[in-house]
Image (tube, rainbow, N blue to C red):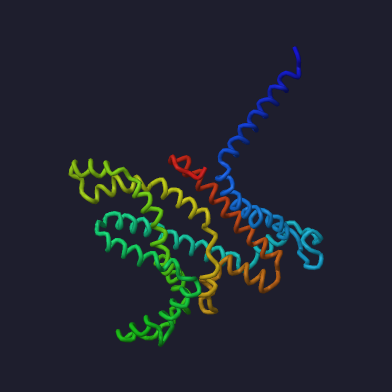
Amino acid sequence: MNRSLPFRRSQAVKLSRSGRTMNRMKRHWELYLLVFLPVLYLIIFKYVPMAGVQIAFKDFNVVKGIWGSPWVSFKHFGTFFHSPNFWLLIRNTIGISVYSLLAGFPVPILLALALNEVRTGPFKRSVQMITYAPHFISTVVMVSIIILILTPHVGVADRLFSLLGMKPTNFLGIPEFFKSIYVWSGVWQEMGYASIIYIAALAGVDPSLYEAARIDGATRWKKIIHIDLPSLAPITIIMLILSLGSLMGVGFEKIYLMQNPLNSSSSEVISTYVYKVGLLGANFSFSSAVGLFNSVINLILLLSVNFAARKWSETSLW
């Protein structure tokens, strides 16, 4: 028996597969061209910079460069873990993230369900425009609005409270108020835009289901419970996985702009700490180690939540 026959067969199979792939690419070249630029963007700006992650394990020196700096292993990670700010940063980051998730995740779903029940066209479009508009306000403008509303003596809220006989209060200077101000202003700003994906999912529900429910005498609440919510379940699980997978990724800009020395005990999170230590303090290796630690925790959370979702439901990212 010729021993080279299996090898030739495998080579023929590979050639046939590559030929089919080339034919498929030629036939759908427009789609591949459409995907090319986003993929190129990811490679250049997301994957190539990963080579710089090694400075988290080095004592980075600007003169020597990334490749010439000496290795220090996990020295910077140990410094961060034993830092007096470690548990403060973890507590604030997780606290703000969990608060934002609990407060902000259900609101777009409720808004989508409410808009799905509205039959009046002009009223529905007006509500959508009013709720979508805050998303397009820049972070700087949004924080400026918050400061103008909550500034003592001249702010709208303080003037209103003074009319009720209450003393002026510096809301942004009280640490206990910071999380609530940050979270609920974010809910107001993002609830309309975040509801779009749920509204799109409800638009794809088969109308015959509603007709059958109407014939059976189902009330509006029963339609929501037995038709709308099951239809939203797959996309809700996907969005929940993505939200939990970025639990440690609290946004930097808004918190940094709202931060002041009076509320820093509640507002100092990992992202602001990395900025202050890495860029302002020029301690690039230490800040890279902190950022890498944050990213690894997010990755572990994403994999864990996706595994749990795949195990307990039929919906997952992969």
Q: Is residue 237 above or below residue 267?
A: above
Position of the N terminus, as image quadrant, is: top right
| Image coords of residue 84 (percent x, y) | 62, 68
At 20% from the left edge and 49% from the top edge, which residue is drawn?
Answer: 219
In front of the other: 160 or 132: 132
| Image coords of residue 295 (percent x, y) | 60, 56
Left or right, residue 316 beside residue 115: right
At 27% from the left edge and 55% from the top edge, which residue is drawn?
Answer: 117
Image quadrant assignment for residue 218: top left
In front of the other: 130 or 98: 130
In front of the other: 136 or 234: 136
Left or right, residue 7 beside residue 170: right
Q: How many marks?
A: 0
Image quadrant assignment for residue 153: bottom left
At 51% from the left edge and 57% from the top edge, which residue is drawn?
Answer: 247
| Image coords of residue 293 (percent x, y) | 63, 58
At 45% from the left edge and 79% from the top edge, which residue is drawn?
Answer: 147
Left or right, residue 307 beside residue 83: left
| Image coords of residue 66 (percent x, y) | 77, 61
In front of the other: 45 or 263: 45
Outermost residue to the top = 1
